[in-house]
Amino acid sequence: MALAEDQSSLKSASEKSWHGIVLQTLKRNEVRLVPYVPDRVLTPLIKNLHADPFFTTFPTAREEEAVGIVSGAWMGGMRGAVLMQTSGFATLANVLASLAVPYQIPVIMLVSERGTLGEFNYGQALVCRTMRPVLDSLAMEHHTVTRLDEFEFIIDRSIKQAVTTQAPVALILSPLLTGGKVFDK
Amino acid sequence: MNTATKTPARNTKVMNRFDLTSRLVAKLKNEEAVVGGIGNTNFDLWAAGHRPQNFYMLGSMGLAFPIALGVALAQPKRRVFALEGDGSLLMQLGSLSTIATLAPKNLTMVVMDNGIYQITGAQPTPAAAVSDLVAIAVASGLRSSSWAADEDDFERLIDQSLASDGPTLIGVRIDDKPGTGATRRDPVHIRERFMLGLGVRQPL
């Protein structure tokens, strides 16, 4: 009994972590295909996606390759989302402007935000500043998530809006949500 | 004119993109998907005859194989072909490793290699004089990769890919001719028609 309670509270804790919310919300919205270019902060999410047979998840060499893959899959009837870091988003202006936006393909992007709130690499801080202007210049929907209690609402509604309006969306996961990456060595 | 292709890396017959694309399209009897890369590759696909299962790229150079991979993963029972130029492939060589790892059985990739960026003024690619794209594909883990010796060999390799237990890549050396047609640049129409052709959407 005590063991069962422990397991239940563990499960509940995992579901209430930011990465647990991502996994459960993707699943509830039938988003099965999750290519990614890894990021330290995304590690627990990537690990849990690999462990769950519901998902087809794998690394790609570049972020735009992953956007191409989920775009093809969408047209073939399978929903997908791409995981990346801020610097990876900075490589996407061409594919967003020439594929996702004009073809009206609901590419769902989860971007682990580096470059702010304690960044230790000046290059990361600079590349982060290019992200929102690119999104705004294409009039793309995007949200910066800072609070765990709002996260499920934002990601669930954003996926549904992307699919129904056939428009890509970027969810920027702030260090306020994830803890971010800190200088340790 | 095009000396770039006269290298040991490419010693097969110089063929023509539109002729090869027409030969491929003539073989398609089972609503196979075909993704045409940016520029001449999809112009010739357009000119070879409109099919609802054709997807025409209007940008995002280098993503024909990743887009086709996505279609192949979403619809494992449908054969998916991707037509890509050599310059485009050079932009996404990493995608060859991704495809080799996922190893979809229903994906056939064709690289149209003239060694030049024909559409921008026929400048040689950085690979033209030194690199063998099929060897790169093999080294990326795509074991079923080969140059087509001539048109008959191309058709044989296409047929062979249909029965393969993994992805296939076919390199074809082509001349420096421009594309034959010009795709109508209406991205939403292209995407919607493709989804209808794949059975994902129903007609309005």
Image (cartoon, coloured by chain):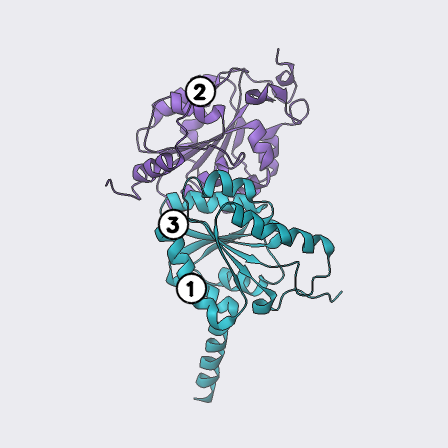
For image coordinates 51% across by 66% down, the residue present is A19
Total marks drawn? 3
Q: Quadrant of residue B7?
A: top right
Between marks 3 and 1, how big is the CA–CA gap?
16 Å
User: Which element is circle 2 on?
Assistant: helix
Disc number placed over residue A25 in the picture, else none: 1
For label 3, the crowd category at 10 Å Cα-Cα, with few meaning under 14, some 14 to 19 and many 20 or more, is many
Please report contact status of discs 1 and 2: CB closer than 8 Å, yes or no: no
Q: Which residue is mark 2?
A: B20
Q: Position of residue B143 (x, y in %)?
A: 54, 36
Task: Identify residue type, mark 1.
Answer: Thr
**Chain in purple in the render:** B
Dividing the image into 4 quarters, which one contains the N terminus of chain B? top right
The hue of chain A in the figure is cyan
Q: Is residue B121 above or below residue B1?
A: below
The image shows residue B59 at horizontal and vertical percentages of: 50, 34
Which structural element holds mark 3?
loop
Q: Quadrant of residue B3?
A: top right
Q: What number is the disc on residue A78?
A: 3
For the point 59% across and 51% down, which residue is it?
A131
Query: Outermost residue, bottom direction?
Result: A2
